[in-house]
Amino acid sequence: MAEGRDGAVFSKPDGWIEPLLAVYRVATCLPEALRLHRAGDLRIRMLLRNLRGVAYVPASSIGVDLGTLFFDEDTEEKLAAAECLVRGRED
């Protein structure tokens, strides 16, 4: 999927991406990442938006629910749900 592209990243049905579970072409990504960093913009989605030829691969295409692999823990409720998920996998 990523061959000949600047990168490839999984996308969720709601449009969000998983930029850590991705591949990036250093030759094109590094200069843009440095430019964004100098400008004070540390959002990886901006890096992806500014590159040409990034493949957005539907997460459903690999048959794995990314929601169970990656999730935000930015509220007490989400943290509790994550802890339950982890405990369930440890049993």
Image (tube, grey):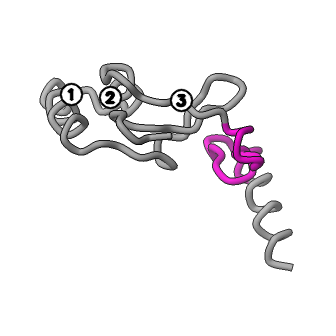
Determine whether the residue tagged by mark 2 lies in a helix, strand or loop: helix
Q: Is residue 61 magenta?
A: yes
Q: What whole-number distance in Å separates the C-alpha atoms at marks 1 and 2?
A: 7 Å
Residue at 33%, 34% (x, y): give it.
Answer: 6
Residue 89 at x, y = what percent? 81, 71
Q: CA distance from mark 3 to mark 1?
A: 21 Å
Could you tell me the amino acid type at mark 2? Leu
At label 3, which amino acid type do we have?
Tyr
Which residue corresponds to mark 2? Answer: 47
Residue at point 50%, 38% (across, down)? 9
Q: Which numbered disc covers residue 36?
A: 1
**Residue at 74 percent of width and 55 percent of height:** 82
Asked whether 10 falls inside the magenta stretch, the response is no
The residue that appears at 47% across and 48% down in the rendered structure is: 20
Mark-to-mark CA distance, 3 and 2: 14 Å
Magenta part of the chain: 59-79
Residue beneath disc 3: 56
Q: Nearer the viewer, mark 3 or mark 1?
A: 3
Report x, y in % for residue 54.
41, 28
How many residues crowd around disc 1 within 10 Å: few (fewer than 14), some, or many (20 or more)?
some
